[in-house]
Amino acid sequence: MRQTVGQLTRYGVVGLLSNTVGYLLYLAFTAAGMGPKLAMSLLYAMGVVQTFFFNKRWSFRHGGAHGPAFVRYCMTYAIGYLINLGMLYSLVDRLHYPHWAVQGVMILLISLLLFLMQKYWVFKAETHEEVAVNG
């Protein structure tokens, strides 16, 4: 439990800083005329690359190989992206909720989903058998 709290705290710091900057850029891009889905897509891709190294080394202190972890990381973010895109389409395009509110809520929900996927799949602790086979 203590390990999870530490991971969640460090993940929260990385996420808070990254998402604050990303959300401010999202607001700036959309205010400048860029569509909400395009702005979210560009910033999402930038965030994946930026946060991988912080989360791998600091948040989860994962010592495994970069390559396999990065592939799993990208897969989790692809899932989060598709959920985010679907919610923007459903709630903004179809139901006409304000995009800035929908995206703000989605940041929180997707962040929780991504934490769980990173903890239990992307950066899970390797067992001795996995190290022997992979290493």
Image (cartoon, grey):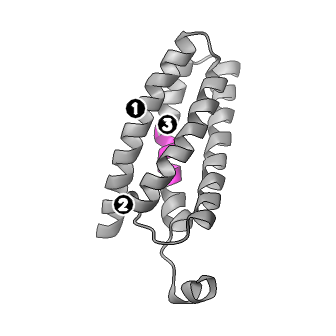
Q: Earlier in the sequence, mark 3 or mark 2?
A: 2
90 to the left or right of 112: right
Q: Within the magenta stretch, is there residue 38?
A: no
Q: Earlier in the sequence, mark 3 or mark 1?
A: 1
Q: Secondary structure beneath disc 1?
A: helix
Q: Which residue is drawn at 62% across and 82% down?
A: 134
Task: State the extent of the magenta-drawn residues as a range.
Answer: 108-114
Q: Earlier in the sequence, mark 2 or mark 1?
A: 2
Q: Residue flagged by tag 2: what amino acid is it?
A: Gln
Report the Cα–Cα distance between label 3 and label 1: 10 Å
Which is closer to the viewer, label 3 or label 1?
A: 1
Report the Cα–Cα distance between label 3 and label 2: 18 Å
Q: Which residue is drawn at 64% across and 28% down?
A: 88
Q: Residues within 10 Å of mark 2 (few under 14, many from 20)?
A: some
Q: Residue at x 33, y 68 (%)?
A: 3
Residue 7, numbered label: 2
- Counting from the top left corner in percent of width and height, residue 118 is at 51, 60
Depth check: give the residue in front, 24 or 2: 24
Q: Do the residues labelled 3 and 2 touch (CB within 8 Å)?
A: no
Q: Secondary structure beneath disc 3?
A: helix
| Quarter of the rendering occupied by the C terminus | bottom right
- Counting from the top left corner in percent of width and height, residue 12 is at 36, 48
| Quarter of the rendering occupied by the N terminus | bottom left
By secondary structure, the bulk of the magenta-drawn segment is best described as: helix
Residue wearing tag 3: 107
- Counting from the top left corner in percent of width and height, residue 44 is at 58, 37
Q: Within the magenta stretch, is there residue 110?
A: yes
Q: Residue flagged by tag 1: what amino acid is it?
A: Thr
Residue wearing tag 1: 20
Q: Is residue 1 visible?
A: no
